[in-house]
Amino acid sequence: MADNSPPTLVFFVLDFSRSSNSTRAKIPLMKAKRLFSQLVFTSALAVMAAAGAGSQIAVEAPRPPARDPYSPYLDIHVDEHCRILPKISSPVSGTKKPRPFTDPAICHLESIEKSQHLEETVAGGQVLRSKVSITEQEYLLQDIVSEPEIFVVEQFVPEGWVVDSDPQPVKVVGATAFFRVNAQPGEIVRLHVGLRHAKPLPPRIIKASSQSGSSGN
């Protein structure tokens, strides 16, 4: 069994009152003082070592490494293909630029739909026609960590197209529309994004005879 009794500190007392020339003092006075100081220091170290051996020292457990951020922002940014934009660090010569990557547990597209139809309006004796193309897709975003996350969907909007869905983007920079989505730990959030493009077609002239015949009937 280990001895848990407190360590005993032994003090050594030397009498320096006598003259250094005394025949009974075999060690010169200055040398004796130096030896006394070393003895006290050694005794103190021994006491500290004994106390440390008889008690447990609390050591802080190492913390797990921080999760590697998915983007250079505080949010998680994904593009229109549900690819996660990687962290952009300072360029280093000889290294390749990190590429976007996919993680279905964080973001995936549930549906992608495309459709076309013809729209007609009458104005000024003409039928104005447009060929309208619609593309829609639904993002499924999941917070897989233990803290709330903010997702930013960066939807590319081609030239001539407009966002035709709700909610509207929080901002549009160039050809990119930014949508902001909040998610709680473990929550899956849906975001529906629709784009619309209208291509004008040659108008159709309404003949006067057709108008008069319609009014006569």
Image (spheres, rainbow, N blue to C red):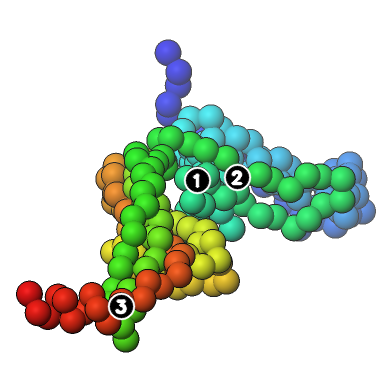
Which residue does the image show at 40% across and 61% down from the upper left?
131
> As shown in the figure, which amino acid type bears the numbered disc 2?
Pro
Q: Position of residue 184 (x, y in %)?
A: 29, 51
**Mark 1: amino acid:** His
Left or right relative to 59: residue 38: right
Task: Looking at the picture, tell me which residue is in the foreground, 203 or 10.
Answer: 203
Q: CA distance from mark 1 to mark 2?
A: 10 Å
Q: Quadrant of the C terminus?
A: bottom left
Can you say which quadrant of the picture contains the N terminus? Answer: top left
> Who comes first in sequence, dot 3 or dot 1?
1
Q: Are marks 3 and 2 in contact (CB under 8 Å)?
A: no
- The mark found on residue 81 in the picture is 1
Q: Earlier in the sequence, mark 1 or mark 2?
A: 1
**Residue identifier under label 3:** 207
Question: Residue drawn at (57%, 50%), measured in percent from left and top?
Answer: 85
Q: Nearer the viewer, residue 7 or 36?
A: 7
Decide: marks 1, 2 in contact (CB < 8 A)?
yes
Instruction: In the rendered view, tell whether residue 116 sits above or below residue 39.
Output: below
Residue 133 position by quadrant: bottom left
Residue depth check, mark 1 versus mark 2: number of the one nearer the observer? 1
